[in-house]
Amino acid sequence: MSTATVRAPAATAIAEDKASAPSRHALLLAVCCTAQFMVILDVSIVNVALPSIRVSLGFAENDLQWIVNAYTIAFAGFLMLGGRAADLIGQRRVFASGLLLFAFASLLGGLAGSQEMLIGARGLQGLGGAIMAPASLSIINSSFAPGAERLRAIGMWGAMNGAGGAAGVLFGGIITQSLGWRWILLINIPIGIAAALVARVAVPERRPQGKQGGFDLGGALTITGGLLALVFGIVRAGVAGWGSAEALGPIVLGITLLSAFFLIEARFASAPLVPLRVLSIKLLRSANLIVFLFSAALFPMWYFLSLYLQLVLKMPPIGAGLAFLPMALTIMACAARSGRLVARYGAGPVLGGGLTLMAFGLAIFGARVAVNGGYVSDLLLPGLLVSVGLGYSVVPSTIAATAGVAPREAGLASGLVNTSRQMGGALGLAVLTSLAFQYTTHLVKVDYRAPLLALTDGFRLAFLLAAALAFIGAVAAFRLIPRVRPGAPAAGPAPVPAAAPASVPASAPASVAPEAAAPLASQATVHPLPLPVSQPAPSARPAPSSGTPVVFPAPAPAAQHATPTPPPHTPTYAPPAVVVFRLGGGQSWPTGGCFTAGGLRG
């Protein structure tokens, strides 16, 4: 019976680690998933508590979004710098430091006595999340063997993105009503400290060998400052108008700083946060665009739905939190299955289908919200549709974003997709909140509509705009993300002889590798040819030129077509074939390696 082996950097080291400490892998995965769950949870956990925070600290209604956006902007701006720190300082040290900083910021937020202190603490929380999130994915990539094992681990990690968003509003409601809004922050302290202690035991320290570059602090400051100024201008536009100096000034400043970021990355940074060459990879660009779009729809949905339940339907915080329980369970169930669907159908169809369901659910929200609406009659069905769509979108988008890059840049790719998620959420929330607030104000002051009716109509507008963003993301997923069907013949030029993969230098870092999309290899058509064990491999492999999976059969023996009968009890090799996927942008996957189908028999 044939088996499958994968040639990948540091595969032997990974196997030895697993054999010596199998239980440590389970503990390692648990602490990494816990960290990612906390990062995403704290984006949405404050949503249900916003009305209580507004009363407690005197926030204006349109300024409440800063409690959410201070976190997401700091997270997005420093995320790439956090990934770079893990590369330079070490995964375990950076991961544990991020957890402790997150816990300390939660303490400051829980004790906040003013609006400024709370917003500052939320920004510091975002910085802690930006430090630990990329480190957690890099730890998983470097600790689990390529193929199905790593896919399952990344699938569980990716499921935390969807589950954290839904569970945030659930836990936020329960904690706010039972203990008070401050405890939605204070509860992170014991969890963060415990996770940091577990990481010291379960996570091995890994540092790249050889000379490394420095920190791109200028890039981090310009992208964070640019995003902050842009969001501030958009928020002010909802109050003063889009043509006012209060709005245009910050928006122009934000665009200028973001332009300076790209200039720094292209011309001045010795070790740029985002090497612009990676943006030439079509699959990477497409996946990040789609993540940006559906995050711009998703983050505002939690925000507006939480406010609608409490301000319009007059639910208490715990009632609003429990209303999200079916959504949280649905997201977790669907996210757990999405990896298998990607393995069978490919990332594009699964992601596109998920975003289509999300768009329909958001559109139904927009059609059904009303002053006299009901949870079961008007919100449960669209909520479940959105949850199914989200569960089937997070994991394939992560797989697509990391599948087309070299192993040494998989950490960069995972950081970039998280940055796109948070930037999309921050900008989407700012834009939709400003438009909804402006529309509500117009209905009250010009049309003399009752405030509660006008507020509901503002929510309706936000849901419909979010549905449009999700639909655009679905169309982009179907058109731009590769579609691979089981058993479909490989398209492209005729197969050419393959060579053994290029050797990996001993100094190459073993921190990350993008085998999350490894199941796609099983969907290619393989044409094996006999290959004796003693036959040397050629020294070079011609580069493919097609845009879909390409299969390179191993060369047949030159002098004969039949393999000699081996002596008794001597194992032989099943006919192998080297499989390489040709991706958009001139890239192949896996980069610098290959999959060898075959194995010992006899």
Image (cartoon, rainbow, N blue to C red):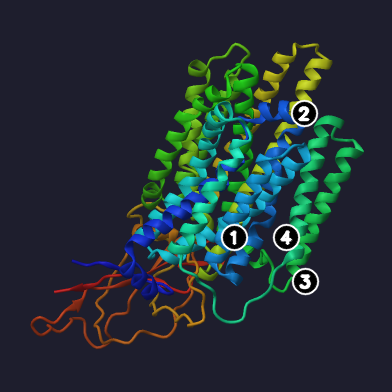
3 or 2: mark nearer the eye: 2
Is residue 291 positioned above or below 215 on the image? Answer: above
The disc placed on residue 97 is 1
Left or right, 301 with reference to 506: right
Gap between marks 4 and 2 measured at Cα: 32 Å
Q: Earlier in the sequence, mark 1 or mark 4?
A: 1
Q: Residues within 10 Å of mark 4 (few under 14, many from 20)?
A: many
CB contact under 8 Å: marks 3 and 1: no
Instruction: Estimate how packed mark 2 is, as few (under 14), some (14 to 19) or many (20 or more) residues with alpha carbons within 10 Å.
Output: few
Q: Position of residue 92 (x, y in %)?
A: 52, 65
> What percent of the width, then of the height, locates residue 13?
39, 74
Q: Residue at x 47, y 51 (%)?
A: 33
Q: Amino acid at mark 4?
A: Ala
Q: Type of residue at label 2?
A: Gly
What element does badge 3 sit on?
helix
The CA distance from mark 3 to mark 2 is 44 Å
**Residue where numbered disc 4 is placed:** 220
- Corner quadrant of residue 67: top right
Q: Which mark is residue 67?
A: none
Q: Nearer the viewer, mark 4 or mark 2?
A: 2
Q: Secondary structure at mark 1?
A: helix
Q: CA distance from mark 1 to mark 4?
A: 19 Å
Q: Please say whether residue 390 is visible from this viewpoint.
A: yes
Residue bearing the label numbered 2: 58
Residue sitting nearer the eye, 215 or 485: 215
Q: Which residue is mark 3?
A: 268
